[in-house]
């Protein structure tokens, strides 16, 4: 685990926290039940919490818990109706084909808990849609990584990761989907052998939730954690024009 969790927002109905990479939201099979974000937060806060959505173990960012059963039902329904807007930051190996686009590739379950793009007309395919915007691109000696915002319109497992890979822009670090388990300066053609990042380069930046009776959705944001900020700074420094 790269860091501890922290509170981003709380009110009488919900609690939003910043999840660190390396920590599961709910108990994982064959692991200690108390070693998950929900149990850790419940223990430290001294209150029961209801899970309404999840992030992958190695994804950091916003996670929202309900503080009562009624709020859990309302938020779960909002997720089911696609009324919740989520924005991810992803550092990828190559820029997407266009500065703005929508990936509508259906997904299908694969072996070992993975997902894959479905074949045309394949039975069991799951409709999936992700909006992608290019934020920044870098030109380095051995790579052209990029920073993108991804906004999934559906909530399939590993959707952002598989969709980005399907357009030739896989995450810079993602061992589950064919990438490296870490990225070093040498991997990018830079001097030195420093490890620039050893975690999934995906961060749940923002979530916008409908709030009954409120004129606008509740917007909660988790700034990128220190490790991703350091990676972005290293990419900026490497791509800076020489004076």
Image (cartoon, grey):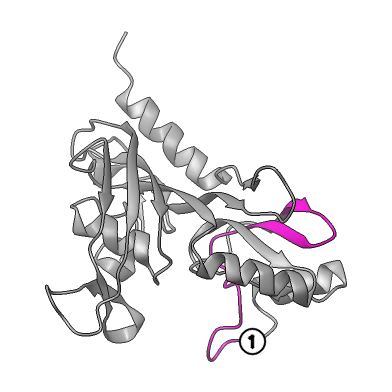
Q: Residue furthest bottom?
A: 30
Q: Quadrant of residue 152?
A: bottom left
Please name the residue that numbered disc 1 is placed on. Answer: 32
- State which quarter of the image contains the C terminus: top left
- Residue shown at the point (82%, 55%) measured from the top left: 11
In the figure, is residue 137 to the left or right of 168?
A: right
The magenta region covers 7-31
Q: Residue furthest left?
A: 120
Percent x, y of residue 172: 31, 51
Percent x, y of residue 9: 75, 51
Percent x, y of residue 157: 40, 72
Q: Quadrant of residue 211?
A: bottom right
Provide the secondary structure element on which disc 1 rests. Answer: loop
Is residue 109 placed above or below 204 in the rendered structure?
below
- Residue shown at the point (62%, 54%) measured from the top left: 209
In the figure, is residue 6 to the left or right of 159?
A: right
- Residue shown at the point (49%, 60%) measured from the top left: 59
Near-viewer residue (191 or 137): 137
**Dot 1 alpha-carbon crowd within 10 angstroms: few under 14, some 14 to 19, many 20 or more:** few
Query: Is residue 126 inside the magenta stretch?
Result: no
- Residue shown at the point (49%, 62%) measured from the top left: 82
| Residue 134, visible in the rendered structure | yes
Query: Is residue 29 inside the magenta stretch?
Result: yes
In the figure, is residue 87 to the left or right of 133?
A: right
- State which quarter of the image contains the N terminus: bottom right
Percent x, y of residue 106: 24, 68
Q: Main secondary structure of the magenta part?
A: loop
Q: Residue furthest right?
A: 46
Is residue 9 placed above or below 235 in the rendered structure?
below
């Amino acid at each position: 685990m790269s860091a501890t969790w922290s509170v981003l927002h709380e009110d009488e109905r919900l609690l939003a926290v910043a999840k660190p990479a390396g920590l599961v939201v709910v108990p994982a099979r064959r692991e200690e039940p108390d070693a998950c974000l929900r149990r850790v937060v419940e223990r430290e806060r001294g209150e029961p919490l209801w899970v309404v959505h999840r992030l992958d173990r190695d994804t950091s960012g916003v996670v929202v818990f309900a503080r009562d059963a009624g709020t859990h039902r309302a938020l779960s329904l909002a997720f089911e109706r696609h009324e919740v807007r989520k924005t991810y930051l992803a550092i990828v190996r190559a820029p997407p084909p266009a500065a703005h686009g929508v990936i509508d590739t259906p997904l299908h379950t694969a072996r070992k808990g993975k997902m894959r793009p479905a074949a045309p007309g394949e039975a069991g395919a799951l409709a999936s849609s992700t909006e992608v915007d290019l934020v920044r691109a870098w030109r380095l000696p051995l790579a052209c990584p990029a920073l993108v915002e991804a906004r999934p319109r559906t909530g399939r497992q590993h959707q952002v990761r598989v969709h980005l890979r399907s357009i030739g822009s896989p995450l810079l670090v993602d061992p589950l989907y064919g990438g490296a388990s870490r990225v070093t300066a040498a991997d990018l053609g830079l001097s030195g052998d420093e490890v620039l990042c050893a975690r999934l380069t995906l961060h749940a930046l923002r979530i916008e939730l409908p709030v009954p009776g409120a004129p606008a959705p509740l917007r909660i944001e988790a700034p990128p954690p220190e490790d991703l900020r350091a990676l972005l700074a290293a990419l900026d420094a490497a791509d800076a024009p020489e004076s």
